[in-house]
Image: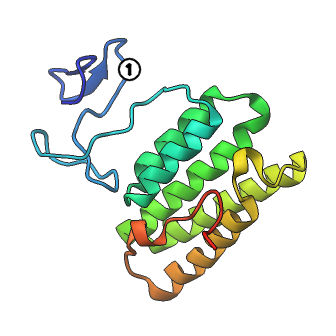
Amino acid sequence: MTGTSETRRAGGRDRDAEGRARNARPRDGLGRPLPYGADGVERAPEGVVRRPEATVAEAQALLDAGRPFHAHEVFEDAWKAGPAEERGLWRGLAQLAVGLTHAARGNVTGGARLLRRGAGEVEEWTSATGRPRPYDLDLADITGWARELAAVVERDAEPLDAARESPRLRGRPT
């Protein structure tokens, strides 16, 4: 089990200290549950409030390591804890990370759909706010990456390498 605030209850359900359902099973690098007692990767803690720059840096490190499921959790924290006017941005980025997760797991339909949905959400947020580079995020590059990758996922119809295909959130090196 992970952490001392999580408990495995008699009915087979994992609960946190407040009684909310929490899956305490270890997970692999793509967020898939492993059997209890197996060695998993360290999970991103949930509910952490980070500065936007720290959110981007932590998510990029996880994406670079081939752990898009965990990057999605970091974006989800920003979506839930950040200012209301930025929720669409962080939600869209979380969807992109989940799309990459599904594509790496071999879920062609879900991966392509979430990559496109996330790109649309980010584009909608950019249009509504007029902010194409918040926190030095290159949103045009990110949405272009997502749409291109969705087409590759559908064309190739096989799992991809999440680390190799991960986006550069702050633009591609020149």
User: How many numbered callouts?
Assistant: 1
Q: Residue 77 placed where, x, y %?
A: 54, 33
Quick check: 41 left or right of 87? left
SS for callout 1 = loop
Q: Position of residue 118 (x, y in %)?
A: 65, 57
Give above or below for 40 relative to 145: above
* Quarter of the N terminus within the rendering: top left
At a point 70% along the width and 67% down the height, the residue shown is: 141
Which residue: 56% across, 39% down? 55
Q: Quadrant of the C terminus?
A: bottom right
Q: Give the residue at the far top of this rendering.
A: 18
The residue drawn where x is 76% and y is 30% is 84
- Which residue, given by chain and number where applicable, does mark 1 sit on? 20
Q: Is residue 81 left or right of residue 72?
A: right
Position of 171 with respect to 71 (left or right) is right
Image vertical order of residue 67 relative to residue 17, above or below = below
Q: Residue at x 46, y 74 (%)?
A: 108
Which of the two residues, 86 or 33, is positioned nearer the viewer here? 86
In the picture, measured across the screen, residue 78 lies left or right of residue 6, that is right
Mark 1: which amino acid? Arg
Measuring from the top left, give residue 10's x and y in whole percent: 14, 21
Q: Position of residue 156 (x, y in %)?
A: 46, 87
Residue 75's place in the image compared with 45, above or below, is below
Most extreme residue toward the left is: 37
Colouring of the image: rainbow
In the image, residue 1 sits, relative to residue 5, either above or below, namely below
Q: Residues within 10 Å of mark 1 (few under 14, many from 20)?
A: few
Q: Residue furthest front?
A: 174
